[in-house]
Every structure is written in C-alpha cells, then in structure tokens.
Amino acid sequence: MKRVLARRLVTSIITFFVTISIVFIFAHLSGDPLAELEDDPRVTPDVIAAMKAAFGLNKPLYMQYLDFIWSVLHGNLGYSLQYLRPVEDIIKERFPYTLALLVPSITLSNYLAYKAGVETGWRRGSKFDLSFMTVSMFMRSVPYFWLAIIFLYVFSVKLGWTPIFGAITPGISFANTWAWLKDYLWHYILPFTVLVFRETLAMLLYVRNTLIEVLREDYITTAKAKGLDEAYVKYRYAARNALLPMITILGMRYAFLIDGAVLTETVFAYPGMGRTVFEAIVNRDFWLLQGAVVLLSASVIIVNFIIDIIYLYLDPRVRYR
Amino acid sequence: MESGKSIRIIMSAFLIGVFVLSMMTINLSNTVKAQSPEEQLWNWLNSQKCLCHGGTLRVTLPSEPNTLNWWVAGSDWSILAVAPIYDHPLRFVNGTLVHELVTDYSWSNNHTVLTLKVRKGVQWHDGKPMTAEDIAFTINVLAHDAWTYYHGYYTHVDHAEAVDNYTVKVYFKSPDAGFIYNALTSMNVMPEHIWKPIIDKYGNKTVTYMPKVPDDLVGTGPFKIVKYVPSQYIEYVANKNYWIKGRPCIDKLIVNFITESSTALLAIEKGDTDIYDGWVTAESVPTLLSYPGVAIQVYVGAYGVYYWGFLNNEPLPNGKFKPHYPFNISTFRRALAFAVNKTEIVQDLLQGYGVPASPGLVPPGIGNLGKYYNPNVANAYYFDLNMTAKLLDQLGFKDYDHDGWRDYPNGTHFSFEIYPPAYDIVRVRAAQKIKEWLSEVPGGGVKVIVRVLDWKTTWPLIYHGKVDSWLLGSGLGVDITGIYRRLHSWPQGTGNWQRYSNPEMDKLLDQLLQAFDEQTRKELAWKIQEIVAHDVPMVPLYHRKYIRPYRTDKFDGFFLPSDASIYNRFTLLAVHLKASKCPTLPTSVTTKTVTSVVTSTYKTTVTYTTTYMTTTTYEKTMTTTLPSGKTTTIVKTYTSTSPVTKVVTSVGTTTVTKPVTSTFTSAVTTTKTVTTATKTGISAAEATAIAIIIAIIVGAIAYALARRK
C-alpha cells in the first residue's frame, strides 16, 4: 500500500510539472501581450522595451522558462502583466470566493446526483425516471450561460428576491459580521443554485447509467432472490458498486468546474478565479495565467491524490494489486 | 378678388411680424452677449442647480481597472477608475477646450517655452494647497520616466519648472503644437508630496506599485476614493472642498464592474445601476427604451476610425522598405476604394449606428478633430464599380484568361487577402461585403480572400507588415496632430501600418507639428486631407456610434456630449437628485435678486424676483402693482415634479398663489437620439415560457414513446 501511495505521489509531481510546462509553452507561443501597445500614441517604443525588461519578456524563451520554474520552486509567482501587481496578491483576493462557491456546490450537487441517480436507475423506465431524464437531458443541452441569465431574469428582475450582480452590496459598511454574512449569502444563493442545479443534472446521468449496469450483475439477482429488503439491495449492493467509477468522474468534475465558474462569475459578475483566468488568457497575461495554472493544477492533482487514497479504502482490488 | 388678395398679404405680413417679434423676445437673453463655447459649458453647469446635496450615483463599467496607479494606467477602465479623484490642467468637453487647473497658457515667440497660469485656491484632498510645483512635478515625471504610460505625449519636453506658486514654465527640446491638446487634456495633476517619496524609493519599480487606498490616492478632483474592493466596486464620496463651489451635488459615487453586458442591462432594467458605460448592441435599443425610466445616449466615436488599410510598402529585415506591388500604386488603391459602399456598411452592418468616414481620414465635423474636416474631399471616391473597372483596366489588371477574375498585367492569376479580426463581427462582415463588391466589378472581378483569425494572431501580422490588407480600428487622437503618426513615413510614422510614404505629405505633417496658429493648422490639415483622399493609403470606412443606457427616474443633470460617453466629468459635477427624491422640502428663503423691471402695456410695473431656495426649489416671485394701488404677489415655485403651493401673507397685499409646473432649461444643446420603441424579438420572460412549453412537449413525447415500448 505504501508503494502504491509513493508511486502515486511521484506521478502526481511529474504530472504537475508537465502541466505547467505545457501551459507555459502554449501561452508563450500564442502571442505577444504587449504587441497591442504599438498602436497606442501614448506609448513610445522605450515604454514597451522598459515593460518587457521589467517582466523578463526580453529574454530568450528557454531563459523565461527557467525563470518560471525557478520562481515556482521558490513559491514566487511573479508579477501580473495586466494588473501590475504580484500574482499572489491577485490570487489571494479572488481564490477564496471561488472556493467558497465551488466546494459547497460540488459537494451538494454530488450528493443530490448520487441520491437521484440511484433512485432513477433503480426505477428505470418508470414515470419518475422518465420525467427526471427528460428534464435532465433538456437542461444538459441548454447553454449554461442562457440558463444562468434566465435564473437571473426570473429571480432577480421579476421576483426581486436576489440581487443581480456582485458578491456583496456595493458601498455598504456592515454593522456586524452577521449583517455582512446575510448580505453575502443573499448574493451567494443564486450563483450557488445555478451551479448545483446544473451539476446535479450533469452528474445524475453518470450515476444512473453505472447503477443500471450494476443492476444487470448476477449478485443483484441473487440478493433479490434471497428476499433481502429493497433498500438494502439498492444501497448496499448496487449503489456501493456504482460509486467507484463515480468517484473518478467526481475528481475530473472538480477540474472541469473551473469552466463552469468562468460562466457563473461572468453572468453574476461574481468575483473569483474563473473570470480572472479567462481574462488572463484573453490578454496573454503570462505570469498570472501561469500562477493560476500552478494553483489549479496543484489543487486538481491533490484532489486526485485524495481520491486515489479513498479508492484504496473503497476498492480492495487496488490495495492488493 | 383683388381686395381678398391684399387682405391675405396684410394678414401674412402681420403674422410674420408677430412671429419675428416673438422670436426676438425669445432670443433676447441670448443676444445680449455672445458667449464663447467654454462660457456656454460653464453656464450650462450653473443652470443645473443642485436642488439638494445627496444621493448615490451608481455607474457600471464593463471591466475592472487593472491598476489604480495612474502613472502606468493604460486601459480605459483603469483611467476611468481614477478619473473622479483627479483634475486635468485642461479638458476637452464636447469638443471644446475647458480650463481646469490651468487658467491660461501662452507660448514664447519661438514656441520653446510654454507658460501655464495655475488656478488659485485649489486644495488636495488631504488639505494641502495645490501649487505650480505639483504640475511641474507631474510633467517632469511623465517627460523623464519612460515607464509612465503617457510618456509618448511628452517626448518633446525638456523639463518643467515652477517659477512661482502659480506659474509653470515648460521648456521644449523642439516645438510641439499638439502638446496643449494631447498632453495637458489627458494629464492628471498628481500630488508631489505623495508621489515624490514613492518614485524616489521605487524608481522603475513604481510600475508595479499598487497605491494604498485611500492614503496614496490623493487628488484635487470632485470625489475622494474611500474603498476599493477588487473585481467588485470602488466607492467614492464627494469632495466638499472642491474648487467649484457647491459641486458635486451627489454625495456618493459607486462604480461597479459587470463584464457581461446582458447582466448589466438587467441591472439597468431593475434600477440597480444608473449608468452602464459599456458596449450595448443596436438590437437591444428597442427593449431598453421600453423599460420605464430608462433612456439611451448615442455618441460618435469620432477620435477613432475603422479603415481598410493596404500595405503600401513592405518592411525588410534591414529596416528598409520595398514597394508592395500592386498596393504601392495609388491608382490601384483608388480603384479598390471605388468598390466600397460605406453607406451600406453603416446602414446594414452597423444598423445606422455609425457615420461614414471621410476619404480624408478626419471625421466629418464631429468633436474637436472634426473642426479640421475638409468637406471638399467628401467625394474623392464613392461606390462605383465602373470606376474600379476603368482604373484597373488602365493599370492592365484585366481578365486575360476569361475565367471571370482579373489577372496581373503579365497574365498570372491575381488575388489578395483581407484580415479582419475575428472578435468584431461588423468588420468580418464588412470584409465579406468588400469581397462581394469586388467580385462584381464589370469585366472581371477581383479575387479577395478573407482571413478571419483571432485578434492576437492578426495584429502581429499587421504591425510587422506581413499581409496585403486589413480592417483595423485605430485612434486618431483628439487633436489634428494625432494624424502625424498615422500618415508620416517611417520611422516617425509609428502608427502608419500601411508604411505609406509621400515626401510631400511628410513635409506638410512636419509643418503641422510646428504650426501654432489656428488658421495655419486648418490650412495644413485641409491640404493633408486632399493628399490622403487622392493617394488612398487606406480607405476610411466608418466611425462607430456608441449606445449608453442610463436611468432617468432618480437623477437630473446628465451631460450628454456628442463625442463622449455620458459618464464624464460634467455629468459628475452636474448630476443631482430630482426634487421628488430630495430628502426634505424647502422651508426658508435665503436670497432674493431682482433680475429685471419690465413696464407692460397696461401701465403696471411687474417685478420679477428670483428666489433661490436652500435645498430643493427655485422660485420666482411676481409682484404686480395694479392701477388701484393694490399689490398682487404671485410666488411661482419651480420644481421638476409636483408643484409646491406656497402662500405668502404680508400687510397690504393680496396674495394669489398659482401652482406651476415648469422645469429648467439648459443653455447647452445636447444631442439625444430618439428611437421609436418598437419591440423586436422575444423577451427573456417569453423565452422562458417557450422553453418550459418545449420541455413539457418533449417530455410528453418522450414519455409517450417510452410507454409504447
């Protein structure tokens, strides 16, 4: 078991460095972030040269790469070209919002998807299953962006239950933490609901399909034939075995959710890393992009590492391989 | 018959007389003194009374500022974010030069020394006086430190020095006629006592210095910054000691950031924001106007132009240039210019939200730049494919192999490329239109290949001079000297991506840079436009019109220039709560001024007394002395909403009170485009309903099908 863990750790570290190298190469091959300044009458070539020197962009590419790896190893993520500030500062002020939005919404949506997936899979072909499937298929094919705008239109503009944008009401000084928390949650609820709604419906199909496959297994028939309680067979025999592939998908969803966050943050004008990463890509803000990727790939790899450990407990076959 | 005719003549003469007389009375106040455009602007501001001080103006920007450090701020949003806290020495307002912190300027005879007179009695937000030292310091930093973003405007400056507390002398290495208009109208006067220690300490590293909020963000502007929440909002409060007394009227300003324009428009609809200073499509105008309390401003982006550029000369690696055949031939370029239908581009692609550009590059009469427009060049070329065919035939570009496409004079196949950036659908479609028009040239079309690539990929191809032609949107600057870098040959013409080169043009542009007399500038500008229209280094296509939605139910006093957004300095100074939104109604009269005495035909003396109220209203008292000796006083209370009835009782007078509903009129005419609110497309609510119905139908079908199995 220790050997398995050690091997996982080594592959994780290699994966991390490969990921950040790929991002470095693609970012730097795709264009010059300062090129646009050439058309600005306020900027002279001296200014561009000075900025290139300040951000180390005048060095050959391999030197820039070594600089980057060197600073990553030292825990220094450099300066953002766009924001002209340390990348750490930008991440520090935005990442908490993303975490606070994503972690609860993934957790809740996975739990809901698990429950609903097991129930619909168990009763496949029933009215209950069909109605769920139809809504789920429809919602999956609807552009996420459109869905979020509709939520906003209905709940914020028409019903006036929630605010339209931001994470906090602008220009208010709060009397106490409780007042702040209330305002924060009031802004939080809609982006959170949209994310949960969307993710639940997306995950539900995976869970349902794996459960249906498990239901075809002989041991399910045996269990049923033994006259075991339905709920017992459903959760102890079927759901448990269906859980394994789901855990893998869950890890992957965590990585993919950043793209969901980009859209959520954009539509709800909610602060966070998703939008920042997106804008860093558009503006070719190398250092910020690299810093964000270092952070994101590190967190995805850590999540996957944790999932691997969970696997070891859930699936004895892995332990003894 | 005869008498009837003469009666008609007498009647019409009488009517004309009445009309002329009435016009005279209306114009009486305006004809007393001819006002300069700047005076008109200040008078407009004075006419916008603060009915009461208070209220929070909420403005939405489509992007967050990258930095609050103005020295290095390049993006529009970073500049806008700090704009309320600083003042400029001079400012362009609706194309008029307005004196802000500099009250007067004069040039030495050889135009190498500029003397600036500094406004007295201006204070920094921290209470220290603003002096000539601060202006000299700001100019010196911008002129000497290449890391500042605006450095390009100060390359001719040697140094600046404060002669006394209120006089600055700026010394030039060589004369720069554009300095006043380019540099002084965009420069924020920065406090020396805050920034000198920072710049001394950090040097070049000031580039990455993030000013502390609010300690480092001290200015002289109408607002003080109090809070900055990254990627969410900036909060400002009114500067009570602003040098324009009693301004601003509002006491708080909140600028928030919404990237997605649909969300911003929902915020406008709901009333969560008062101004959205971001991109709005023409399609959303009818919907916006259907919301109660929402209006739109339309202005022309007159300081930038969208054009079809041709690579006249190809840059070589050794820094020299090689003619880029056939784009180096002006007749060839003119032939292509005749194949462009600008009106159709503006009408169909921009849906009317644009102005066709002049062949001379200078915008037709819009903003400050438009003052230099030469109308003679307007018809230098126009949409006429027969002209294209004629000119191409002259050059020998004919269809030799009869495949329907024109070939090089030597008979080989000819085609060229246009590069529009992928993000701008208008330019992509314009390129496709141009391709279409050129394919229809009589006697054989011209083959055009449209290459749509990501902007970050397209742009290096253009600025390295690697492609035949492109559709670009470029800034021209607020002053006519801005065209220097767009038309001068290299290396001075740093924005001349066409690599256009004409010695005569270079000579005129060099003269323009040294011409200080307005008449000479205009003459040179006209000559330059004639050459541009004749040589066609590029085909100017259009100037875009921009749409800005704002809410009218809470505030009055928005300043709507024809060449800039509603979110501008004059709006910030003039915007005030409507009377109905003011917290308290007036209770006492403070000042009374007798403005005029008019003797009427009934031999009664009418005295108009203007009464300003402390907080919300503006009153006019009319006292009429009747022949019987009795005096009648009528108090008119002017508020912009419901009338306020007020009874004034005094001994020996009869008081008649009349409710009146008049509003103030402004001295400045501002443009406002009225678009009829015809609803097109479906609203989000209808879309939801349709979506739900579709979902139910799909569900029912799926269910029915499943049941059949």
Image (cartoon, coloured by chain):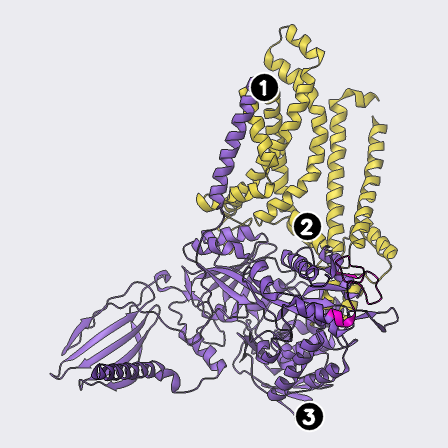
Chain colours: A yellow, B purple
When asked about the image quadrant of residue B444, the answer is: bottom right
**Percent of width and height locating residue B675:** 45, 60
Is residue B205 magenta-colored?
no
Q: Position of residue B602 (x, y in %)?
A: 17, 84
Give A150 or B180, whichever is nearer the viewer.
A150
Q: Look at mark 2 in the image and give the residue it sits on.
A: A278
Q: Which mark is residue B110?
A: 3
Q: Which residue is mark 1?
A: A125
Specify whether residue B396 is painted magenta. Answer: yes
Image quadrant of residue B451?
bottom right
Q: Which residues are magenta?
A: B392-417
Say what amino acid the circle numbered 1 marks.
Gly
Q: Disc 3 sits on a residue from what chain? A: B
State the CA–CA distance, disc 3 to disc 2: 53 Å
Discs 3 and 2 lie in a common subunit: no
Amino acid type at circle 3 is: Asn
* B665 lies above or below A250: below
Q: Amino acid at mark 2?
A: Phe
